[in-house]
Image (tube, helix red, strand yellow):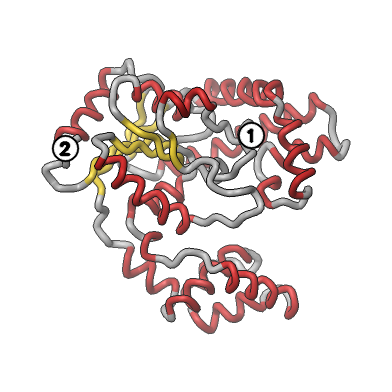
């Protein structure tokens, strides 16, 4: 694959809500184009979380190279900055191999940070500093870190809710590691030109069809052994594992604690997943650069868009 005339690396992005067929479209395109897939899913980075995250099967991973999956154990920390730090070099390597980098996933923040240039300028997590910050909050009481952030970076403190400890810690971490205000770094790099020429496609279904697909996939996950997957994770890492407090996994935990029966479990996951898909749609529809397409590459439009990305 040759560099674009603009000297920017071409990147194909396939995004959209859960259950919309993003991975299927990417794998289908891989039969027609030399591409490699970079997962932009905040949970697929974790090992042993396969069924509940709809991770590509081993056969699919053999069929098409997949990256950014099975990177760390579920009890390890991962962040947007870490994602960008790992994914950006991958884009370069895939392009140098003569392949098209294809970013696939529904975690909009990961995609935005990766392609927009902001998060790459931020320091990665410092586990020791982060531990000390959480410890300080625990010892001195709720709101301690937010008060510290107000002193170091009033602008960030104004937009981060005092109860949002994760974002508060991240903002403080950046301030302390760089000696600069988190808000100032973001403002400085918001307008950095992206090194990529991006085509962003999103498979689209009528809302009711999407919900039906979600309902069917939930049933398939449960048949495939989602409950057993959660049991193994809980036994190995404990039921308080943060990754188990996410969609699908937390509902199974409730089921295992006898708070609902199997039928209620399925209905609860279906409902929560439909609600999550609705939020994802709201996020992605705010992006005017996304082209909403049919869910297969049979559409002439899909291939025309990609041909234009590669050749210009």
Towards the viewer: 146 or 228: 228
Towards the viewer: 61 or 141: 61
Name the mark on residue 2.
2
* Residue 192 image offset from top left, x and y in percent: 27, 61
**Outermost residue, left direction?**
5
* Residue 68 image offset from top left, x and y in percent: 47, 43
Towards the viewer: 296 or 97: 97
Q: Residues within 10 Å of mark 2 (few under 14, many from 20)?
A: some
- Above or below, comparing residue 107 to residue 157 in the picture: above
Q: Classify mark 1: helix, strand or loop.
A: loop
Q: Residues within 10 Å of mark 1 (few under 14, many from 20)?
A: many
To which quarter of the image does residue 62 belong? Answer: top left
Mark closest to the chain's N terminus, 1 or 2? 2
**Outermost residue, right direction?**
258
Quarter occupied by the N terminus: top left
The residue beneath circle 1 is: 52
- Above or below, comparing residue 304 to residue 159 in the picture: above
* Residue 148 image offset from top left, x and y in percent: 58, 81
To which quarter of the image does residue 63 belong? Answer: top left
Name which residue lies at 25% across and 48% down.
196
Work out how far the residue at label 1 is from the one at label 2, CA to CA, in angstroms.
38 Å
**Outermost residue, bottom direction?**
151
Name which residue lies at 37% across and 60% down.
120
* Residue 88 image offset from top left, x and y in percent: 35, 51
Q: Is residue 169 left or right of residue 63?
A: right
Q: Classify mark 2: helix, strand or loop.
A: loop
Total residue callouts = 2
- Of marks 1 and 2, the one in the foreground: 2
Name which residue lies at 50% across and 78% down.
176
Name which residue lies at 43% across and 81% down.
179
Towards the viewer: 208 or 255: 255
């Amino acid at each position: 694959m040759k560099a674009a005339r603009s000297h920017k690396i071409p990147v194909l992005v396939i995004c959209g809500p859960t259950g919309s067929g993003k991975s299927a479209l990417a794998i289908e395109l891989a039969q027609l184009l030399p591409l490699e897939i970079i997962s932009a899913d905040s949970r697929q980075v974790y090992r042993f979380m396969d069924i509940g995250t709809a991770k590509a099967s081993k056969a699919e991973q053999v069929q098409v190279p997949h990256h950014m999956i099975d990177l760390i154990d579920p009890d390890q920390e991962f962040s947007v900055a870490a994602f960008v730090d790992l994914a950006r070099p991958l884009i370069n390597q895939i392009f140098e191999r003569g392949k098209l980098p294809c970013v696939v996933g529904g975690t909009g923040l990961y995609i935005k940070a990766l392609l927009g240039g902001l998060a790459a300028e931020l320091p990665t997590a410092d586990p020791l500093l982060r531990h000390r910050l959480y410890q300080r909050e625990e010892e001195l009481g709720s709101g301690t870190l937010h008060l510290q952030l107000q002193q170091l970076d009033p602008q960030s403190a104004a937009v981060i809710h005092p109860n949002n400890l994760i974002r508060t810690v991240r903002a403080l971490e950046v301030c302390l590691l760089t000696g600069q205000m988190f808000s100032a770094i973001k403002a400085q790099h918001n307008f950095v030109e992206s090194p990529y020429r991006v085509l962003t496609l999103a498979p689209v279904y009528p809302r009711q069809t999407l919900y039906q697909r979600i309902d069917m996939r939930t049933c398939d996950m449960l048949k495939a052994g989602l409950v057993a997957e959660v049991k193994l994770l809980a036994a190995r890492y404990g039921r308080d594992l943060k990754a188990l407090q996410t969609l699908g996994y937390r509902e199974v935990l409730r089921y295992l604690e006898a708070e609902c029966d199997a039928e209620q479990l399925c209905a609860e996951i279906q409902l929560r997943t439909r609600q999550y898909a609705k939020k994802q749609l709201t996020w992605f529809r705010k992006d005017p650069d996304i082209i909403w397409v049919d869910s297969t590459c049979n559409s002439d439009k899909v291939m025309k868009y990609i041909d234009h990305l590669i050749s210009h």
